Image: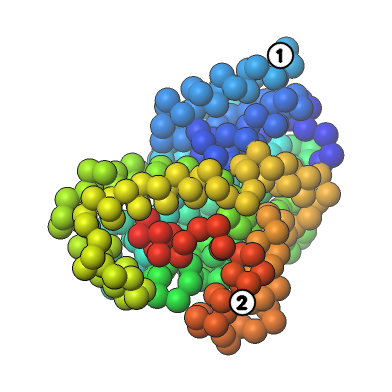
Amino acid sequence: MRDFAGRIAVVTGGGTGMGRELCRQLTAEGAHVAMCDVSVEHMEETAALCGQDAPDGVRISTHPCDVSEEEQVLRFRDQVLERHETDCVHLLFNNAGIAGAGSFLTDPREEWEKTFGVCWGGIYFGCRAFLPLLVAADEAHVVNTSSVNGFWAALGPGVPHTSYSAAKFAVKGFSEALINDLRVNAPHVKVSLVMPGHVGTSIVMNSTAVLGRPSPKEMTAEDLEPIRERMKRQGLPVDAISDDQIREVMHQAGLAFRDAAPLSAADAATQILDGVRAERWRILVGEDAHVLDDAVRADPESAYEASFMQKLQAKGVFDRMPLQALGAED
């Protein structure tokens, strides 16, 4: 599908980050977009930005939806059919995601399952709801967002990252399995697996809100205790660091993840859409994703050792973001 004009595109997580930029670029090319998000305010901002560049006649609709809840996804689907007066969809971008519950052992089960539910359940429920509408189109494309954590289940040694990584591995396996499934049962529907590296988005701050956590500056001393323990395991002099200093480090880490990333969300969206046009089933987003992919394939046995991280940093991967700050935010 080399031309998006006149097509109907569904984008989950369209309120911010890559989802917002996908909506903006799709509508600028003349596609009709239906986006969902848990934040009505963020979606309204996205819709306003889309309207600035969209050609006349382009329809943009917003739909509150938690993609970890199948009932809400099905309601979203029904609203898309009604609002866009259609019986098919041409593009499905399963993009929504959050990050949390790094440890399977010490983090709350509810947070672990919520993170997994959004990052994997959102893909599963999205495909269950919308794939029949893609099959009903003359040609269509489903685009599932995984992550480099779909082939490397860590943020580095000493930093657990279990829920997000497990979900992203599931997305990778499911999307690859869809390749043959669609070739056999719906060859006019293509699939792409998106695996971004560090992209400048607000996922750190958004995840805090979705998971019901206090913001860094609102955290109590009790809230900070697990962070102190994590920093201690990483060899940091936590006894010499005040609670306010930890709060500020965490706050700045969230901002830096968004603002100091090696790739902007807009550039990431462009790479994704270029991959869709080229019908590539595997879309690595960002130079760091390519470096990490090569490194894991070359030496998988050492992927979770400190030496592996040192090699990545020597190649310029993760050198813009302190590992301990990432760990504190996860």
Quadrant containing the C terminus is bottom left
State left or right for residue 231 relative to residue 33. left
Q: Secondary structure at mark 2?
A: helix
The mark found on residue 311 in the picture is: 2
Q: Secondary structure at mark 1?
A: loop
Q: Quadrant of the N terminus?
A: top right
* Label 1 Cα neighbours within 10 Å, binned few <14 / some 14-19 / many ≥20: few
Q: Residue furthest front?
A: 240
Task: Give 98 or 215, whichever is nearer the viewer.
Answer: 215
Q: Nearer the viewer, residue 321 or 284?
A: 321
Residue 134, image quadrant: top right
Q: Comparing marks 1 and 2, which lies closer to the viewer?
A: 2
Q: Residue 229: x and y, percent?
A: 25, 70
**What amino acid is labelled 1 in the image?**
Gly
Rate crowding at label 2 as few (under 14), some (14 to 19) or many (20 or more) other CA atoms within 10 Å: few
Q: In the image, is residue 95 above or below residue 15?
A: below
Q: Is residue 254 visible?
A: yes
Name the residue at 68% across, 55% down: 286
Which residue lies at the image location 83% right of the left edge and 34% below the top edge? 3
Please determine whether, in this image, residue 159 is positioned above or below residue 81. Answer: below
The mark found on residue 175 in the picture is none
Q: Amino acid at mark 2?
A: Lys
* Label drawn at residue 57: 1
Q: Give the mark, 1 or 2, whose residue is nearer the N terminus.
A: 1
Furthest residue to the bottom?
301
